[in-house]
Image (spheres, rainbow, N blue to C red):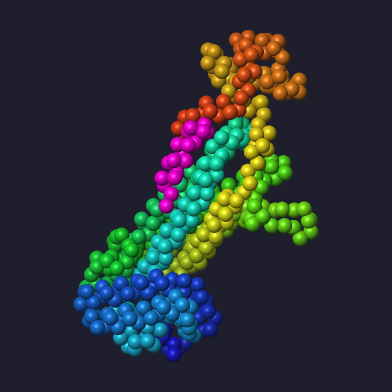
Amino acid sequence: MSHQLWGGRFAEPTAAEMREFNDSFRFDRRLAEADIAGSIAYARALARSGIITEQQRDALITGLEQVHREFAESTFIAREGDEDIHTAVERRLFELIGPVAGMLHTGRSRNDQVATDFRLWCLWACDQLEEAVSALQGRLVDQAEAHVETLMPGYTHLQRAQPITFAQWCLAYATMLARDRERLRDCRRRTAVLPLGASALAGNALGLDRESLLQDLPFERLSENSLDAVSDRDFAAELLFCCTLLGAHLSRLAEDVILYSTAEFGFLTLADAYSTGSSLMPQKRNPDSMELLRGKAGRLLGDLVALLTVIKGIPLAYNKDLQEDKEPVFDAVDTLLLALRVAAGAVATWQVHTERMAAALDDAMLATDLADELVRLGMPFREAHSAVGRLVRRAEELCIPLRELPAEELAAAVPALDIQRYRSLFDHRRSVERRSVIGGTAPTAVRAQIARLRQQEV
Ligand code: ARG
């Protein structure tokens, strides 16, 4: 038997293709748990507000709990006519408890119902994402801890710039992820607003005590305008933005790792568990985990753009366009939860080639340190910059490392600097240690960053 929630005023049945087009159960069945939790809370509030009796409430709750079990145990049997999750749950409830099932929807519309369900689902998603981000962050901090003293080149414009520690590189990503977590928590606050009681658009007319709904659901506040409540999908757009930016961060990490694991760099080797081979070239070991992480960023951005485009320009209040809100969010959250697990596994198991990192350090990366020394001797920085620039050019012309510049070349260019002192400045470790400001790459500053991040772990 079909349990269509509308239809009294229709003389003709819906066209088959229209039904297929309109039905959302194939994807919104994922809201089952949220839908039932919302309905149980609603039944309690109806009884508290004197709209249904306590016996009716208990019958509804017993039935809803049974439907919940069927979804949880995958024994729920969908029927022709289960238009969406709301219809499916109510249809099954009717089969289980009879006509009293019809009391549940008193004063409620699918408009405030679906907004409630979807927010509840997004709240869970925020929590799961934060946990997964925290796990990846933890693996990056582990790596940092193991490599506080490991030197490597730092790059700008992908050109060797200054020596840094590998820990500093790991912590740069851990710091991005700290912002992602903060953003998710912030998004969570605006998601935890309960629309139930807004009804179709104008608000419940039967004296429902909305405040009491908050007792049974994990929302922090009630929505304040019924028209906005049923048509607001900002929370979903915000969640998708959080996902998109997280995806962008993962794509940057992935790109660095792809570069660093080339033969040309040779800084890292991904574990076999996170690499794949070529069907043709037997020697190949490809960083597919990282390439997929990089590629997923495009898909996440697509999900965000899809939803923003749906929201744009729809008139108040609810319109069926809004049914298009769910699939992009489900896709983004599924994609990211798996991506974050892969990233954490890859980070925890890669091999770090500290000798290759050290071998990539060259003398020219210490040019800034030379200029700083001239500043210490009293030269204005601009002048020091240009004097050291000339030294670098001379060394290049002579095809020798900067530190091997002959004494007379140095005396001609920078008379103030004695050759012994000059040669002693070519020490990458000292260069790193000097950068001990808060947030700097020096091991002392890196240890402080690690301590701060460890405190934030969940
Ligand atoms: N399946 C719908 C959605 O996802 C539920 C709300 C339907 N409301 C309505 N007035 N037709 O948005």
Q: Is residue 91 above or below residue 289?
A: below
What residue lies at 77% left-to-right and 53% top-to-bottom?
283
Residues drawn in magenta = 440-458
Residue 46 within the magenta-colored segment of the rendering: no
Q: Is residue 342 left or right of residue 224?
A: right
What residue lies at 49% left-to-right and 29% top-to-bottom?
436
Residue 188 image point, x, y percent? 39, 56
Frontmost residue, 350 versus 382: 350
Q: Is residue 138 above or below residue 58?
A: above
For the view shown, which residue lies furthest in the front direction? 146
Q: Is residue 366 left or right of residue 88?
A: right
Where residue 192 sits, quadrant-wise, is bottom left
Residue 78 image point, x, y percent? 48, 82
Q: Is residue 291 left or right of residue 146?
A: right
Frontmost residue, 302 versus 357: 357
Q: Which image quarter holds the N terminus?
A: bottom left
What residue lies at 55% left-to-right and 53% top-to-bottom?
344
Q: If the picture is divided into quarters, which one holds ligand 1?
A: bottom left
Q: Is residue 397 above or below residue 458?
A: above
Q: Is residue 317 visible?
A: no
Q: Main secondary structure of the magenta part?
A: helix
